Image (cartoon, rainbow, N blue to C red):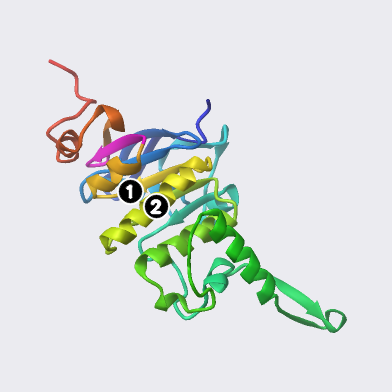
């Protein structure tokens, strides 16, 4: 099986600081990759390169077997790379369906095309369809996003990405500031995405979340990839040792 995403020898510098130092990583269809590391390890910089926020100084990115240049976030979205950051980028004063179609609203022509108005009925039905697909339950679709719980907001952000044909989902600390029950629901959604063939890169400091849903774990330390492990072949204690620099698989053995 070919990887959907392959980043090869990626380097990103900010002045004299090398934030990402020759990092390579593959992501295959239908798998969850846990991307972990301490603060400043380079995780966020790496995903911002994949999502078009930053451009790499060196290295290549392949998507679906093709060498690609991701110059801006819209390039990534056009390819099907969706990134959900901690702030979710939702409009709190709008409804669930309005957020799913935010910036891509559906309109209908009236009076022979002289007037164009939002097709709220269609947007509502399409939003309900994608929520049902992901088994997301939101009691009142027309209520404002700001009235939803943190877990429900996270679910709406995921549903929006799936509706717009996400082929790869990047999720940055998706369970931060959520209660235990809502954390479990978000992890269930990640599993559901994997079961539907949508790979997920999960960035998290929470080892429980990483081990609960990931198939492989990639560890960064000071901008370098120091380990890549199948989740079933490691444990949280070993991963933490890599994160804080006590272990490094790139060092030559004595």
Q: Residue 104's spot in the image, x, y percent?
A: 62, 67
Alpha-carbon neighbours of circle 2 within 10 Å: few (<14), some, or many (≥20)?
many
Badge 2 is on which residue? 171
Can residue 76 be seen here? The reply is yes
Q: Residue 161's spot in the image, x, y percent?
A: 53, 57
Q: Secondary structure at mark 2?
A: strand
Badge 1 is on which residue? 203
Q: Which circle's residue, 2 or 1, is located before the other in the chain?
A: 2
Start and end of the magenta stretch?
215-223
At 30% from the left edge and 33% from the top edge, which residue is drawn? Answer: 231
**Magenta-colored stretch includes residue 221:** yes
Q: Secondary structure at mark 1?
A: strand
Instruction: Tell me: 68 left or right of 9.
Output: right
Looking at the picture, tell me which residue is in the foreground, 222 or 98.
98
Marks 2 & 1, CB-CB < 8 Å contact: yes
Looking at the picture, tell me which residue is in the foreground, 121 or 40.
121
At 56% from the left edge and 54% from the top edge, which residue is drawn? Answer: 133
């Amino acid at each position: 099986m070919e990887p959907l995403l392959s980043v090869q020898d990626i380097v990103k510098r900010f002045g004299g600081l090398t934030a990402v130092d020759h990092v390579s990583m593959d992501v295959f269809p239908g798998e969850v990759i846990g991307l972990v590391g301490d603060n400043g390890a380079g995780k966020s910089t790496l995903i911002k390169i994949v999502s078009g926020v930053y451009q790499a100084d060196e290295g290549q990115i392949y998507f679906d077997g093709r060498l690609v240049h991701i110059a801006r976030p819209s390039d990534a979205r056009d390819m099907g790379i969706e990134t959900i950051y901690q702030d979710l980028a939702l409009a709190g004063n709008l409804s669930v369906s309005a957020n799913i179609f935010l910036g891509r609203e559906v309109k209908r022509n009236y009076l022979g095309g002289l007037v164009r108005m939002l097709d709220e009925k269609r947007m509502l039905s399409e939003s309900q369809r994608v929520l049902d697909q992901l088994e997301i339950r939101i009691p009142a679709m027309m209520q404002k996003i700001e009235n939803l719980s943190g877990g429900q907001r996270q679910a709406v952000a995921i549903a929006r990405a799936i509706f717009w044909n996400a082929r790869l989902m990047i999720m940055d600390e998706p369970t931060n500031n959520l209660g235990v029950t809502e954390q479990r629901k978000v992890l269930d959604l990640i599993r559901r995405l994997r079961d539907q063939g949508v790979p997920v890169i999960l960035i998290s400091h929470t080892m429980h979340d990483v081990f609960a849903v990931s198939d492989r774990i990639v560890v960064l330390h000071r901008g370098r990839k120091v380990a890549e492990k199948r989740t079933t072949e490691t444990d949280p204690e070993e991963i933490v040792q890599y994160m804080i620099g006590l272990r490094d698989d790139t060092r030559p053995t004595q």
